[in-house]
Amino acid sequence: MDKVELNAPAFVYAIYIKAAPEAVWRALTRPEFTEKFWWGRRFEGEWRQGASLTLRAPDGEPDFTSEVLECEPPRRLVYTFDVTKSDEPASRVIYEIETVGDSVRLTVTHDHFLPDSKVRDGVANGWPGILSGLKTLLETGATLDLKVA
Amino acid sequence: MEADAVFKALADASRRDLLDRLFDRNGQTLGELTKGLAMSRQAVTKHLAILEAANLVITLRRGRKKFHYLNPVPIQLIAARWIGKYDEARAAALVDLKRELENDDGQG
C-alpha cells in the first residue's frame, strides 16, 4: 500500500474458496467467467495498471467504467468504480487474494463513497451475491473432480 | 464445517444484535459497538470473536483503531444452497478455466 489510510472503508467482504489463487484471479477478471456469476456481465478492456475497462450488462448497457490502479496477479487488484448512470465520483474496489491452507481467502473492500452516496446502497446488495456465485462457480468442479491445480 | 460455525454464531440473540448494529452502521470500533448495550466490553469481545471465527464479522486495523464489519457472505451462501439452483453453465465454465490454466502460466 502506498499510504496508510486512517478512514474506515464502507464495506469489507470476505469469502473462502477452495481453488488456486490463479483460478480466482482468472474468474474475477475474464469476461467469459464474470458473465457466469456477475449476472451476465462482462468486462471489456485490459487488466493493466493505468488501463480502462467497462463492465457491460447482457443488453450491452455499461454498468460502470474503471481505471486499474494496481494490478498484481494473482494477489491484488485495485480499480475505480464509476457508475455510468450516476453523477457521483468514482468509488474504489480492492481485491486481495491470500492462500489459506488448500483454499484462498478473497477480501473485497469497497470504499471512497460520498457520505450520502446512492451508489453505496446499490453496491451493498450486489457483492454478497456476486461472491457467492463466484464460489459456486469455482467449487462446483470439486464434486465433478475438476479441481483447478 | 463452515455452515456449523455460522449457525452456532447466529443462535444467540446478543450476537444477532451486534450484527444488527453493524448492519445499521458498518465499520465500528469495539467502543462504539458496546455503547448503549447492557453487555460488558468483555462479553462483546467474546461474542465478536465467535462472529469473526464464523466469518460473519471482519476486522480491519487502521492506525491504532480496529473496525468491525458485517460480512453477510456466509448467510448468502446458506441461502444459495437451498434457494439457488445448480447451474450447469458454471460447471462448463470451470472446465474452460481448468483448460486455460493448464495451457499457460496462469498470470494475467
Image: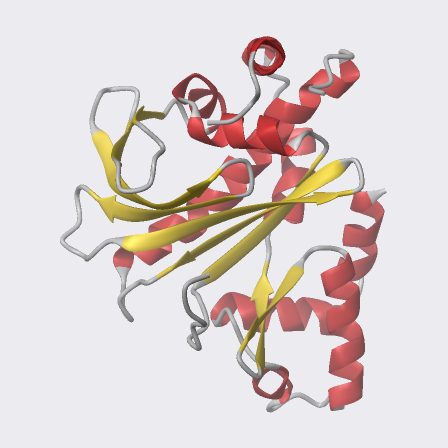
Residue A22 percent location from the top left of the image: 59, 29
A50 vs B48: above or below: above
A13 vs B102: above or below: below
Give the residue drawn at x 65%, y 39%.
B77
A81 vs B79: above or below: below
Between A99 and B85, the one nearer to me in the picture: A99
Residue B71 percent location from the top left of the image: 60, 56
Give the residue drawn at x 43%, y 23%.
A30
Residue A141 percent location from the top left of the image: 70, 17
Instruction: Tell whether A75 sits left or right of B40.
Output: left
Give the residue drawn at x 78%, y 17%.
A143
Give the residue drawn at x 80%, y 41%.
A101
Instruction: Tell whether A123 sits left or right of A56.
Output: right
Residue B74 percent location from the top left of the image: 67, 47
* Residue furthest out toward the left: A87
Q: Quadrant of residue A97?
A: top right
Q: Quadrant of the N terminus of chain B?
A: top right
> Total of numbered circles in the picture?
0
Q: Give the image's coloring scheme.
A: secondary structure
A130 vs A110: above or below: above
Between A55 and B43, the one nearer to me in the picture: A55
